[in-house]
Amino acid sequence: MIQGCVSPKRAKICLLKFIFFGRYNQRVDTRSKEKRSRIMAAVHSKNTTTELLVRRFLWSHGIRYRIHPSYLPGKPDIIISRCKLVIFVHGCFWHGHENCSRGRPPKSRVRYWKSKVKANKKRDCLIEEKLKAEGWRQLVIWECQLRTQKSASIALPKVLDSILDMCPEIALKGANRP
């Protein structure tokens, strides 16, 4: 009997689907090609919601930065050039965040998505090595850390502390300056 088929009658249907479609358990997309295309076209790699949240937070605390410089490997999301610090705001799905529910591949086309995310992770490691070789320090912020208002209110001050630890010369807006 074919896996997932309980009765002999159901097994015949499963076998026919298996022969016709190639795989029985293949999920069918519930959206039309045009609708799926519009959804996927809306996914961008720059100026994501989480990235904008981090940028607004840094700017409101007086930290000035550049965004997406093409002269650095990987075009980091945010750079603070005076202390050679790059900040990547990674999406959990696209960068394969470990132990995160949003970092797991979808149930359809598993092989494709696993290889894609694996290639992204490999590219991230290469970019990290290149930036280290050029003397840049790095900070990675994951999308799940900023998903809710509560988690963002905890994570963003920690990010700020990390930046200040890496770059003590940065003076915060409104802080007492000597």
Image (tube, helix red, strand yellow):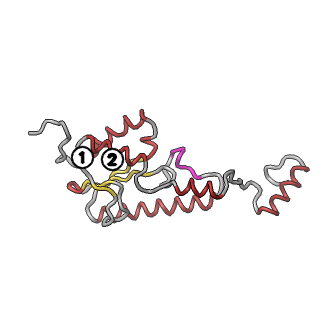
Q: Residue furthest top?
A: 150
Specify which label sits upstream in the sequence, 2 or 1. 2
The image quadrant where one finds the N terminus is bottom right
Left or right: where 9 falls relative to 107:
right
State the image coordinates of residue 50 (x, y, percent, origin top left): 41, 46
Which image quadrant for residue 16? bottom right
Distance between the alpha carbons at the discs numbered 2 and 1: 9 Å
Amino acid type, label 2: Arg
Kind of element beneath mark 1: loop
Residue labelled with disc 2? 55
Residue at (77%, 61%) from the top-left corner? Answer: 21
State the image coordinates of residue 61 (x, y, percent, origin top left): 25, 40
State the image coordinates of residue 25 (x, y, percent, origin top left): 74, 54
Residue 134 covered by magenta stretch:
no
Q: Could you say which is closer to the camera, residue 48 or residue 76?
A: 48
Q: Could you say which is closer to the camera, residue 3 or residue 62?
A: 62
Q: Which residues are magenta?
A: 99-105
Q: Could you say which is closer to the camera, residue 118 or residue 45?
A: 45
Which image quadrant for residue 177? top left
Amino acid type, label 1: Ile
Kind of element beneath mark 2: helix
Residue labelled with disc 1? 63
State the image coordinates of residue 114 (x, y, percent, origin top left): 57, 58
